[in-house]
Amino acid sequence: MQFENFAALWEMQGHGPYVWGAYAIAVVVMIAVVWAPLARQRRFISEQRQAAQRRHQRQQQPIA
Amino acid sequence: MWTFFHKLGSPRWFYGISGRWLPWLLLGTLVFLVGGCIWGLLFTPPDFRQGNSFRIIYIHVPASMIAMAGYILMAIAGAISLIWRMKLAEVAMKCAAPIGAALTFLALVTGSIWGKPTWGTWWVWDARITSVLVLFFLYLGVIALYEAFENKQAATKACAVLCLVGVVNIPIIYWSVEWWYSLHQPATLKLMGKSSIDPSMKYPLMMTILGMYCFYALALFLHMRAEILERERTTQWVRELTGAGAGEKKHAV
């Protein structure tokens, strides 16, 4: 370990805000890149299911 | 060989095989990217000239490299979709654009943050930085162009052409630090020949590059799978997968 304690790791001799800021942005961007298609897929599947249910209900109704 | 080619072009086959790859890619990302970053952040000595700010390298370099590699992949997919009209290539090209844009954005932002303590400025209109900004705009251009067309076949064709034309930017980015006098440091990591980077910094960097490739593949697969489901919504296998076909089959009999 290059740093003696957590405070030194956080500070990084004055470079802490730059280094940790860069890593924080990286984490946010990368999670967003992976999360977006997962959310899209989940939404799509639930939409398809609902549409099928509506079709199903319509078929159940007796023809007037 | 041709059966393999046709199989590769089948969205259903890709959906199945990519699903099996996902856990391994996630594992690769976690081990190499997270592991490499922890190694680089905590256990490598500071740079003798740049101090601790150099630790940004472990996301900046992988993000920049894969942003460029991703563009080449997108252009190859574009070429395949133009020549053979392969469905999967169209999907790959469309899905590579937002991921590439995100990684290029990351490269620019982390580079800018690195530039402040190192060069004393957030931004310079330097050959390397400007050409990467052009790469970012190319990615955004592909996304915007695709959305601009109502007819998605025409959109795919136009995007493929834009992707191919934009490839000219890749060698410009790559050699920009050598062709022009640049504030940006030249490459320290070389595949052939001797790297000028210290081994203690090199190994975690190579780990994070490998990890970023895993991450890219993971993200691309996830985007492609979501896209494939929507495109193939009317096919039997997607209806069964989403559970949309189950209710109807009973009544169809």
Image (cartoon, helix red, strand yellow):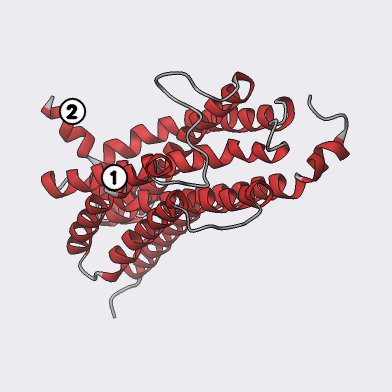
Query: In front of the other: label 2 or label 1?
Result: 2
Please give the chain letter of the residue carrying mark 1: B
Query: Residue at label 2?
Result: B4
Please give the chain letter of the residue carrying mark 2: B
Q: In the shown orientation, is residue B7 left or right of residue B125? A: left
Residue B209 visible in the picture = yes
Residue B88 visible in the picture = no
Query: Residue at label 1?
Result: B237
Choose between A21 and B49: the one closer to the eye. B49
Q: Position of residue B226 (x, y in %)?
A: 39, 50
- Inter-mark Cα distance, 2 to 1: 20 Å
Q: Position of residue A28 (x, y in %)?
A: 61, 51
Q: Which of the 4 image quadrants contains residue B20?
A: top left
| Residue beneath the point at 60% across and 47% down | A26
Q: Residue furthest bottom?
A: A64
Total number of numbered discs in the rendering: 2
| Residue beneath the point at 59% across and 53% down | B112
- Amino acid type assigned to the residue bearing label 2 in the image: Phe
Question: In the rendered image of this protein, does residue A2 appear above or below residue A60?
Answer: above
- Callout 1: helix, strand or loop? helix
| Residue beneath the point at 44% across and 39% down | B65
Q: Are marks 2 and 1 on the same chain?
A: yes
